[in-house]
Image (cartoon, grey):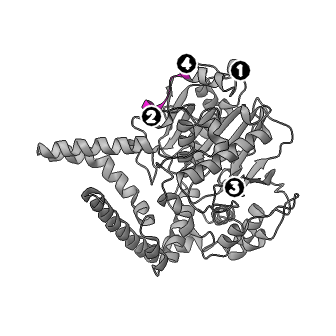
Amino acid sequence: MSLSSALYSGISFILGFTTLGVFTAFSFIDTRTWQTTSIVSLQRLRKAQHDLWTLSQSTSSTSLEHKFLCLDSGLQLHYLSSFRREPQKSLVIFLHGFPDSANLFRHFLVPSEPHGTATQFVALDLPGFGGSDSLATYSATGVLNAVTEAISELKRRYLEDGASGGRCILVGHDWGGLIAYRVAAETVGLVWRVVTINTAYAPLFKSNAGKMTEECQRALRKLSFRTAWRESGPWLSQLLKSSYIFMFNLPMGLLAKWPFIRRVIDHELRWIWLNGHNANPESPVPSKASNWVQELAISQASCYGPSVDECATHDAEGLSYGPSVLARASCKPPGDWLQRIRLYREGLASRQWVFAEKLKQFEAPSRRNSQRFRCAVTVIFGLQDIALDPRIVLDGISGYFTSSDVLGKTHEMYRTGEVSISRSTSSHVLSLMHCGHWSLLEDTGTNTLEGVLAWAVSGTAEQQKDLSVVLGEKGVVLGRDVTLDVLR
């Protein structure tokens, strides 16, 4: 190990252990989070888990159904879908992040307003989350091959053109967005457009952090301390926001033996449910009305996944949740969270992706020599993100977009839908001034995502309206709460 690697490992351990100590202290001090979420009774939680996860009957109140995919490896993935029986012209696939499940997107699976074209909406549980089986390894190869095979199979099931084409739109939040970025950069012919929500693209993140470090070092050599402080600001901000990642990357033996680890995890989940899933911008103290309490219970049930009782149910085809899902349901708190944080530990963000043989048809040529996106990308980002500094994850993102004329030729080559070079292959960055990390659950973010999807699936290029017009119809006022940059 080189001296620099040893130094980085040492600093990472110190930061991680310090964060673990701070989080442990907060789990005892932050009585507001415990008291507020304790109003969710065990009975209410059990009902929410039953409503969200039971396979014995369809959730008629939301018009959703539970379905499974069995991959070639034997891995079983669970997903939620809107009720459709005939092949569709468009397919929208949602990927959640940590610590969520497919239920994060349940409100988007049945649009409040019909779109101009027949569209199937699907929300997939990532491996090890929700109702999907756990993986032996959460490397880039393991997770990305599983997700890519699932996308291909979903296209075959729901699109008129099957797995070989069709208008497939991949939407990802947090880790789901990071996966979507990698799909955009390293595959061709798999998806037509990618939409990311409050996530980071690893090459840009690394590039911006490196540039800021170099500028800071240059200023220090000139003894310009004020400049050095200014240049290091975004980097230090991100370091603070990412402190939990250093904790997640502590030796697993240390985490497993930490006497308060269960309490720390439980507290962090409760904080997310209170301040992320159920953030109330009108008041720092959420209402204790029954509907809010119910939403809090749904947030818990969504993240925990199926309970032991739901694991005993079967769908119409006789399928049930796998043994690893049952094992996660039996943990306290439910979910086996030390297993789930392996997303952060095993290189999913940046390590090499080795395509499985059957998926090599989607592998982009010379992908390791180019980090540009190979399909149109729409970025939605809430600027009040608690985990990501926009100066690190947004500045310079336009450098990774490919021009519309190149995208048009690529889409035509791979038969991924009708293309308008001036519109449908445009890429966008939508900055939401007052939204946080779970922007899609806030009013402005919800309307923005619905507007983007309505625009993206609205038929041929000739039928498409300008995105700004569609957003306006959804009540999104550009320039006041949202800024839109169109990158052609």
Amino acid type at mark 1: Gln
How many angstroms separate mark 2 from mark 1 (CA)?
37 Å
* Residue 474 location, quadrant: top right
Q: Which residue is mark 4?
A: 405
Residue 326 pos. (x, y %)? 71, 71
How many angstroms separate mark 3 from mark 2 (CA)?
29 Å
Q: Assess whether residue 405 is covered by the magenta stretch.
A: yes
How many angstroms separate mark 1 from mark 4 (CA)?
19 Å
Q: Which residue is mark 1?
A: 463
Can residue 111 be seen here? The reply is no
| Category of crowding for the residue at label 4, using alpha-carbon neighbours closer than 10 angstroms: few (below 14), some (14–19), many (at least 20) | some
Amino acid type at mark 3: Ser
| Category of crowding for the residue at label 2, using alpha-carbon neighbours closer than 10 angstroms: few (below 14), some (14–19), many (at least 20) | few
Q: Which residue is mark 3?
A: 73
Q: Earlier in the sequence, mark 3 or mark 1?
A: 3
- Magenta region: 397-406
Nearest to the eye among marks 4 and 2: give it: 2
How many angstroms separate mark 4 from mark 3 (CA)?
38 Å
Q: Residue at point 56% right, 64% down?
A: 340
Task: Please state which of residues 234 and 257 is positioned toward the viewer in this rendering.
Answer: 257
